[in-house]
């Protein structure tokens, strides 16, 4: 098993700032590019599409405001990890040039809805992917599943699966981000969160003494609701996804949650466009980063 980088672990535990989620994968890439002003007629196959999204991510990462002053970690898609920025592998570039801890999205998307939840699809080849991640300097992973309603059996199954995968990740010396997202539009969102919190605490309690995970959840309905997770010795950090809220609303909601920091994707890149000059792009980026950082303090 590989040793966890102590400097990176310290940054993820104590660092001020947020985690940038740059991990849209195959299914969500056309939408991400569309919001960035790159339409589907601008590529003719998947390779060209991924070239365009890598250009977008490179532009974000190289922006002067994308630095460890405000951003402590970044989540990458497998294709981004396998590519380079200025001739340097992306994860290495993030840490060495920017002081930002690299994570890797490892799930294969969501299964069909059952029992009010969507579990993760099976992840064949996960061990091999984790080994590649270690070799490329990845610190941790992220795996997303989805909770659509307060169904006790479904939520239990969802969290069980998350921690099953987390154990596999931990065995490679990586820190897993467990992400059971609750639908922000669920009619019984607060009840779903209450069931989820109990299940998460149960699994954290059962982890061996020397192991920690991170937890990524929707911004809760109730203020300070995830404090028991934030204070749990087996939980390195609790981070919030934007879940579809526009950035301003996501920031406002997050600012009322002491101890939680952002891990925004759509809300981070909101307002960025391929048509902007570098000056306009960097100004928009700086504004976005500053707002999310302040909400995460």
Image (tube, rainbow, N blue to C red):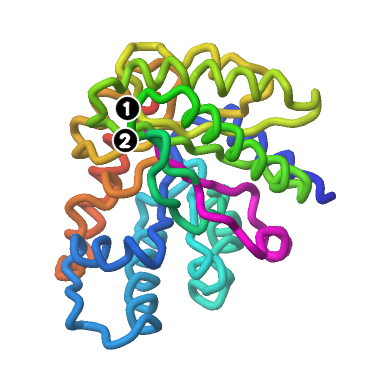
Which residues are the magenta region? 120-147
User: Label 2's element?
Assistant: helix
Residue 126 covered by magenta stretch: yes
**In the figure, is residue 139 to the left or right of 242?**
right
**In the figure, is residue 260 to the left or right of 213?**
left
Residue shown at 19%/33% (left/top)? Answer: 248
Q: Nearer the viewer, residue 188 or 184?
A: 188
The residue beneath circle 2 is: 292
**Where 263 falls versus 96 (above or below)?**
above
Where residue 163 appears, as percent x and y from the top left, is 64, 36
Residue shown at 21%/50% (left/top)? Answer: 270
Q: Nearer the viewer, residue 271 or 143?
A: 143
Tell me how far mark 2 sits from mark 1, CA to CA.
5 Å
**Residue 130 in view (yes/no):** yes
Mark number, residue 219: none
**Residue 262 in view (yes/no):** no
Specify the quadrant of the image occupied by residue 261.
top left
Density class for disc 1 (Cα within 10 Å; few <14, some 14-19, many ≥20) is many
Q: Are marks 2 and 1 in contact (CB under 8 Å)?
A: yes
Where residue 200 appears, as percent x and y from the top left, is 57, 23
User: Label 1's element?
Assistant: helix
The residue beneath circle 1 is: 295
Specify the quadrant of the image occupied by residue 128.
bottom right
Total numbered labels placed on residues in the image: 2
Residue 123 covered by magenta stretch: yes
Residue shown at 51%/54% (left/top)? Answer: 121
């Amino acid at each position: 098993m590989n040793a966890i980088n102590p400097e990176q672990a310290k940054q993820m535990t104590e660092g001020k700032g947020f985690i940038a989620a740059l991990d849209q994968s195959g299914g969500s890439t056309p939408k991400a590019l569309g919001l960035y002003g790159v339409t589907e007629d601008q590529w003719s196959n998947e390779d060209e599409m991924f070239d365009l999204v890598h250009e977008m991510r490179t532009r974000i990462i190289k922006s002067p405001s994308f630095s460890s002053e405000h951003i402590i970690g970044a989540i990458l898609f497998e294709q981004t990890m396998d590519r380079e920025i200025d001739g340097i592998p992306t994860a290495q570039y993030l840490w060495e040039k920017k002081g930002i801890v690299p994570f890797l999205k490892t799930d294969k998307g969501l299964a069909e809805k059952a029992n009010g939840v969507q579990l993760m699809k099976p992840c064949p080849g996960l061990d091999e992917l984790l080994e590649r991640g270690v070799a490329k300097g990845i610190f941790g992973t992220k795996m997303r599943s989805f909770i659509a309603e307060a169904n006790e059996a479904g939520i239990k199954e969802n969290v069980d699966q998350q921690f099953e995968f987390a154990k596999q990740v931990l065995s490679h010396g990586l820190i897993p981000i467990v992400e059971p997202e609750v639908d922000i539009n669920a009619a019984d969102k607060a009840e779903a969160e209450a069931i989820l919190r109990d299940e998460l605490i149960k699994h954290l309690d059962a982890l061996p003494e020397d192991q920690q995970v991170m937890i990524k959840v929707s911004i809760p309905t109730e203020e300070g609701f995830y404090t028991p997770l934030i204070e749990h010795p087996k939980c390195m950090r609790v981070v919030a996804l934007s879940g579809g809220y526009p950035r301003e609303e996501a920031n406002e909601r997050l600012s009322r949650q002491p101890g939680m920091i952002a891990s925004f994707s759509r809300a981070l890149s909101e307002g960025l466009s391929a048509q902007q000059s570098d000056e306009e792009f960097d100004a928009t980026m700086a504004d976005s980063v500053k707002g999310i950082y302040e909400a995460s303090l």
